[in-house]
Image (cartoon, rainbow, N blue to C red):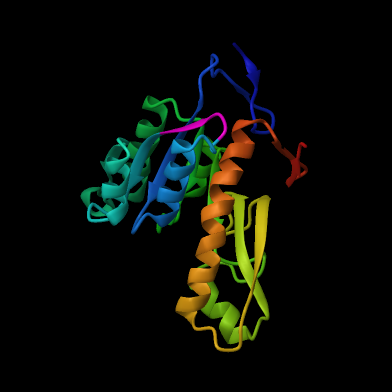
Amino acid sequence: MIRLSPFHNMISFFQGENMKVAVLISGRGSNLKAILDAEKTHLLGQAKVIIVVSNNSKAKGIEIAKSYGKKTISLEANNFKTKEAYEKELEGIIQNHGIDLIVLAGFMRILSPNFINKFKNKIINIHPSLLPSFPGLKAQKQALDFGARISGCTVHFVNEQIDAGPIILQEAVDIAEDDSEFSLSEKILKEEHRLLPLSIKMISEDKVKIEHNKVRIVK
C-alpha cells in the first residue's frame, strides 16, 4: 500500500506496517523511556521503535532500550577517522533498517548539513526552551540568566541551523524566583516526556504537514 507520507513532498511505502522509528541518544535516556512507555501502552500511534543508536557506549539509555527488547547500536565518534565516515555508517544503519523517522532524544552530536539533507523532514528533535528563544546548549541556564518568567520545551524538525527547524509542538513552563538550573530542567523534562511521544504519534497518523517552512497540524 502506498500512502502519503507525513513528510512534505514525500511518499512512504509502509505497506500497512507501522512507521519505523530510530531513536538517537547520548545519555540517561529519559525521553527514550517516555517514547517506549508510550509505545508499550499503545499511545505512539502507528509508530514503532525499531532501533536505538547511541554515540556513547556507556549511556544508561542503552540498558533502558534493551529492557524493552529494542535493538541497540553503539556508534562512538572516536572509532571513526572523520565525521563523514561516522555519518556514512549512521546513514547505512538508518537505511538498512528502513527507518521512516529519526528522533533525536538527547543526542549530543551535531549532524552535518549533508546528513540532514539526505533525511530532509525526517528528523525531529526535542529542545528544552520555547524556541526560537534560547537555542543551543544550556537552554535552562540561558533562561535563568536572562531573567525569563516562562520557558518550556519545543519539538521541531531538524534543519541545517541549530534548533531552528519548523516547530511541531511547544509547552510552556513557569519559572519560579527560586528555580535553579536543576529544578527548571526537571519541570521542563516532565513536559518533554509528554510532548515528544505525542509528536511522534501525530506524525505517524499523517497529522503533521510542512508548508512554507511552517508546520500545519491536521485535525
Which residue is at the far front? 41
In the figure, is residue 50 to the left or right of 71? Answer: right
Residue shown at the point (61%, 51%) measured from the top left: 156
Q: Is residue 109 magenta?
A: no
Q: Residue 81 location, x and y as percent?
A: 25, 49
Above or below 3: residue 74: below
Count of marks, rendered view: 0
Q: Within the image, what quadrant is residue 107 found in?
A: bottom left
Above or below 168: residue 175: below
Q: Residue 199 location, x and y as percent?
A: 60, 44
Q: The N terminus is located in which quarter?
A: top right
Q: Within the image, what quadrant is residue 88 found in?
A: top left
Q: Residue 52 location, x and y as percent?
A: 35, 41
**Over which residues does the magenta segment extend?**
45-49
Using the rendered image of the protein, determine whether residue 131 is visible from the camera's viewpoint.
no
Above or below 143: residue 107: above
Using the rendered image of the protein, determine whether residue 130 is visible from the camera's viewpoint.
yes
Taking depth in this image into account, of 120 and 33 the one nearest to the observer is 33
Taking depth in this image into account, of 67 and 161 the one nearest to the observer is 67
Which residue is at the far bottom? 178
In the figure, is residue 169 to the left or right of 145? Answer: right
